[in-house]
Image (spheres, rainbow, N blue to C red):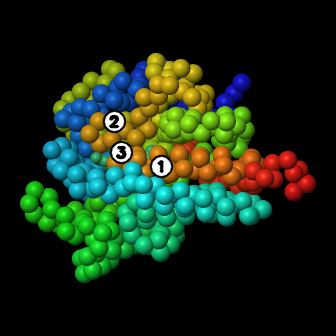
Amino acid sequence: MPCPFHNHHPDPFREPRHKDGILLNDFHGDVMPILLRHGDVRNAARDWETFSSDAPFKIPIPTEEDVRTVRQLPLEIDPPDQLDYRAIMEPYFNRAKLPDVIAQIEGLVEAHVQAALKRETIEIVREFAIPLQSHGLAYLMNVPQSEAETWIKWGVHVFREGDGTSKGAAMEAYAASLLERGAEKPSDDFFSALTRATFRGRKLTREEMLGFCSIVFAGGRDTIINSISGVIGHLAKTSSDFEFLRADPKRIIGASEEFFRVLSPSTHLTRKCTRNVNLHGIEVQAGQFVSLNFAAANYDPEVFDDPESVRLDRRPNPHVAFGFGTHLCLGAAHARLMVRTLLKTLCQRVARIEIIQAKDRLETESSYQRRLAYETLIVRMVPIDEKNDSSR
Ligand code: HEM
């Protein structure tokens, strides 16, 4: 039976991963090799001395030199500096494990689901996932919820949606204003904490602070939004999976990992080679870039049995949706909290989800096209107590 998750978009990397282990793609005139196998992606992510992240603006694909002015930290730098920068941020990302923050996220998701249930229909990407992501981030960063209203207006991707250049500049100016406020009125929020943080005994420069802000606002935005719409779309299409989770909520933790694997919201990121390397017969010179394709690695049949099937009880599930090695996603605990809480609340409150209209979000490159959850997803959520009422 074809997997409803993939409908018309099977894994685009199946053949090149099996045949060559590598794919060449023309990214706006730059032909770059893409690593596709699970083992290769993990090895490259681990070997930062050969596959370096010390390349400001060039770690994301497409590159971002046109849309921001600062190096994203700790993403675009190598150890040992990366580890020291990472330590500055870690306490805020660890907030996702605090009982108070977990309770705040539970309240937030409950409110959004209840509001959706009151509506005849709701557009999940813009009316549900973007506000949920923005308010969730406000809790994580410990800023007033009113700040989320500004972030909601940025859309799915701060840089890649609409006019990236002016939106990027506006986002940097806004981040600078949060830092100024944080310096003037010290508080426990992330931005204020940055103004007091030290790196090897000195205060952070304004550019470094903005580099942290940039990844907080841009890095975990579309990934969470696409995870939310992808999960809701899947439960709408596959009621048996919805019932499987409802029957035993302990299954939600494993199911979330399977959703991150199949959705792989961050397709790939690059590394700059520090020496000449030969990758599956392709000579890559020092200074050239290579892509680590986490999405392709997550469908490697050598590691995942029947990878194109969504198996909510898949175990083990060594996916690399959050990367691997020294740059392993700092926002993973928050992403997990958001998705697990969403699944728990949907199981408790929603009997079924009906799709009224859906348009896939596609990532189209010269050598492949992959599905990234939804551009638009209009649904009707039917409350639990209405389960047997077919008159509505
Ligand atoms: C489902 C959601 C998410 C996915 C799939 C995801 C994916 C990733 C991946 C693949 C990396 C590795 C980068 C590399 O190896 O170069 C990464 C790093 C990172 N992510 Fe996420 N991310 C998600 C959510 C978030 C959120 C919500 C935030 C922040 C609010 C965030 C902040 C970061 C940071 C700061 C790093 C850099 C860590 C370092 O360089 O040490 N991520 N993420």
Residue type pointed to by label 3: Cys
Q: Farthest residue toward the bottom? A: 184
Residue at x 27%, y 80% (from the top left corner):
185
Q: Is residue 288 visible?
A: no
Q: In this view, does 9 lie to the left or right of 214?
A: right
Q: Mark 2 and mark 3: span between their CA atoms? A: 8 Å
Residue for badge 3 = 329
Q: Where is residue 47 in the image (x, y as percent from the top left)?
A: 23, 32
Residue 369 to residue 316: above or below: below
Residue type pointed to by label 1: Leu
Q: Position of residue 358 (x, y in %)?
A: 70, 50
Query: Element type at marker 3?
Result: loop
Residue 47 to residue 389: above or below: above
Q: Where is residue 284 in the image (x, y as percent from the top left)?
A: 27, 30
Q: Mark 2 and mark 1: span between their CA atoms? A: 19 Å
Query: Element type at marker 2?
Result: loop
Question: Are discs 2 and 3 less than 8 Å apart at CB?
Answer: no
Residue for badge 2 = 324
Residue type pointed to by label 2: Phe
Badge 3 crowding class, 10 Å Cα cut-off, few under 14, some 14 to 19, many 20 or more, is some
Residue at x 39%, y 54% (from the top left corner):
98
Query: Element type at marker 1?
Result: helix
Q: Farthest residue toward the right? A: 391
Q: Can residue 298 be seen in this view?
A: yes
Q: Where is residue 377 in the image (x, y as percent from the top left)?
A: 67, 53
Q: In which quarter of the image is the C terminus?
A: bottom right
Q: Mark 3 and mark 1: span between their CA atoms? A: 14 Å
Q: Earlier in the sequence, mark 2 or mark 1?
A: 2
Cβ(mark 3) to ligand 1 < 8 Å?
A: yes
Residue 43 location, quadrant = top left
Residue for badge 1 = 337
